Each structure stands twice: as C-alpha cells, then as structure tokens.
Amino acid sequence: MKKIYYDAGIRIRDLREKKHFTREQLAEKADISSKFLYEIEVGNRGFSAITLYKLAEALNTNTDYILYGKKKNSMDNEVMNVIGRFEKEQVKSLIEMMELIYQMLKTR
C-alpha cells in the first residue's frame, strides 16, 4: 500500500489511543467497521475522502493532520474563507495589497 496510507494509519491509531477510544468506538463514530479501521491503521487498506472526513470528525482533527501530519490553524481557515469570497482576478489584487501592507509593517 502507498506510504501516505501507511503514515495516515499510524496517525489515526495514535490519535485514537490518545483519546482513549477503542477501535470499536472510533469505528462506530466514523460509521465504518472495526475490521476496516484496523486495516487502515496498519496501512493495509486505502480509504475514500468520505471515510477520511468521517475519521477526522470523529477524532476532532482535520484531514491535513491525518494525511500530512500538519494541522492547519484556525487563522489559516479564516483567511481562506475570506479569500474564497473573491473572484480570481480580485484575489490577485488582494495578494498584491497584502504584500504592500506587509512591506509597510516590516519597515516600522
């Protein structure tokens, strides 16, 4: 199985154990079988985006952490939510303005 599934399985198992969930408890919360969860945790099976999402929700984490070992912080989410409201051309202008603001603040 691909390394990303193996690494994700390790992180899922570690989170499950830190939260003191049995495999059966987490499987129930994520609406998957405990056998399937075992296969994920040991890296023998891949999983769908829906299963990834359900596991992240059940473990109170985000999918980035499960897949890559990095947590996005809430500020990242806020910034992306605001940027997502703009049209593509507006985003380019927004980035330019942010760069100018950064340069101004840096020189203070």
Image (tube, helix red, strand yellow):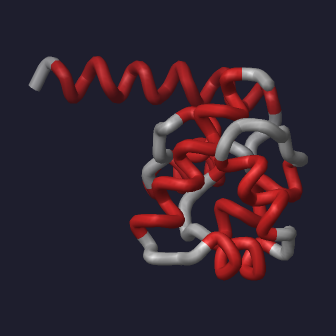
Residue 37's image quarter? Answer: bottom right
Q: Is residue 52 rendered to the left or right of residue 41? A: right
| Image point (53%, 19%), residue name | 96
Where's residue 24, x and y in %? 70, 77
Q: Establish if 82 lies above or below 20.
A: above
- The residue that appears at 58% across and 68% down in the rendered structure is 59
At a point 67% along the width and 22% down the height, the residue shown is 3
Q: Nearer the viewer, residue 80 or 27?
A: 27
Q: Position of residue 22 (x, y in %)?
A: 58, 76
Say which quarter of the image contains residue 87: top right
For this orientation, the residue located farthest to the left is 108
Quadrant (top left/top right/bottom left/bottom right) for the N terminus: top right
Residue at 71% across, 37% down: 43
Up-down relation of residue 46 to residue 102 (above or below)? below
Judge left or right: residue 83 versus residue 74: right
Residue 66 in the image: state x and y as whole percent: 60, 46
Say which quadrant the C terminus sits in: top left
Disc count in the image? 0
Residue 6 locus on image (x, y percent): 66, 33
Q: Is residue 84 left or right of residue 73?
A: right
Q: Is residue 86 left or right of residue 99?
A: right
Asked if residue 108 is positioned above or below residue 13 in the image, the reply reads above
